[in-house]
Structures are given as structure tokens and as C-alpha cells.
Amino acid sequence: MSQKIFEALIELANDFGSGNDLQHNTKTNTVYRGAKYHAYKDELIEALDELNDKFKVQIDKGDELAVNLTFYQTNINQTTRATKDLDNMEKPTLDAMQVALGFDDSQIVKKVSQKQSHFTRALRIELWKA
């Protein structure tokens, strides 16, 4: 039986980051995440830290986790190239969740994600002990 351990609906100022947001420095030949990726991730970490201060999510290293993510975007049509791909939005989101909530993404054994049109940009997170 699953136990819900965290739930949040977070309105976002920054656009959703993308796992494809990679930049290349030709002088040093290094690849790094771009500013948009970090702006989104940092905003989400800050919001999750604030929530975790109140709710004190407890996740042990051996816990198997299930996550449900809903990305609310302001685009009317979610199937055009103007919208981010679902899998690309997951990467910075899960990275931020790991930092703020203290787990490793290898603990995720089930993941459900969706994107929907909405009047404002927001992210809904549900986290369960599987």
C-alpha cells in the first residue's frame, strides 16, 4: 500500500527548465547547463525548501518512491513544438526535488507525468512511498 508523503502545487515565475538546455564553451571545451535551466531549478528548490521546512518530509535511503508530476503551461495547444517535451521538463524538476527533499532519483520506481494548459504556469507534485 502506498503512502503519500508530499503534495504541492507551486506557481512558477520562471519557465520550466529543459534537460536539453546544454551550452558549450568552445574555449574550454566544456558542456554546462544554461541559465534558464538553473533559474527554474533554483526557483523550484527555494519553493520546495520552504515547504519542506513546514512539512518535514522524511525519506530513508531504502525507500522506494513513486512520483506524479503535472506541468501546467500557458500554451493552449500542448502538442506543438512551442511547448516543451514532457521528458525534458522532468530532468530539472527531479534534480530540484532531490536537492530539496533529500532523496536520490534511483529511489523512484514509478513515475507518472503529464502536461496541461492552464491560465498560469505551475507544477503539481505528489510523492509517495511505494
Image (cartoon, rainbow, N blue to C red):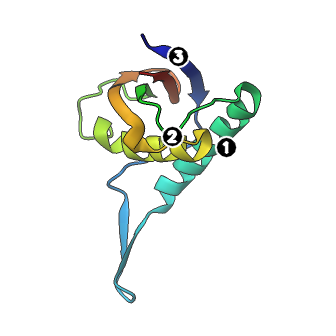
Could you tell which of marks 3 and 2 lies nearer the N-terminus?
Answer: 3
Q: Is mark 2 on a helix, strand or loop?
A: loop
Could you tell which of marks 2 and 1 lies nearer the N-terminus?
Answer: 1
Q: What element carries label 3?
A: strand
Identified by mark 2, the residue type is: Lys
- Percent position (x, y) of residue 3? 50, 14
Relative placement, left or right, of 28 versus 87 is: right
| Tag 3 residue | 4
Q: Which of 80 and 96 is in front in this view?
A: 96
Relative placement, left or right, of 120 versus 33 is: right
The answer to whether residue 29 shows anywhere in this view is yes
Could you tell which of marks 1 and 3 lies nearer the N-terminus?
Answer: 3
- Percent position (x, y) of residue 97? 53, 40
Identified by mark 1, the residue type is: Glu
- Percent position (x, y) of residue 84? 33, 40
Mark 2–mark 1 CB contact (< 8 Å): no
| Tag 1 residue | 46
Relative placement, left or right, of 65 versus 46 is: left
Q: What element carries label 1?
A: helix
| Tag 2 residue | 61
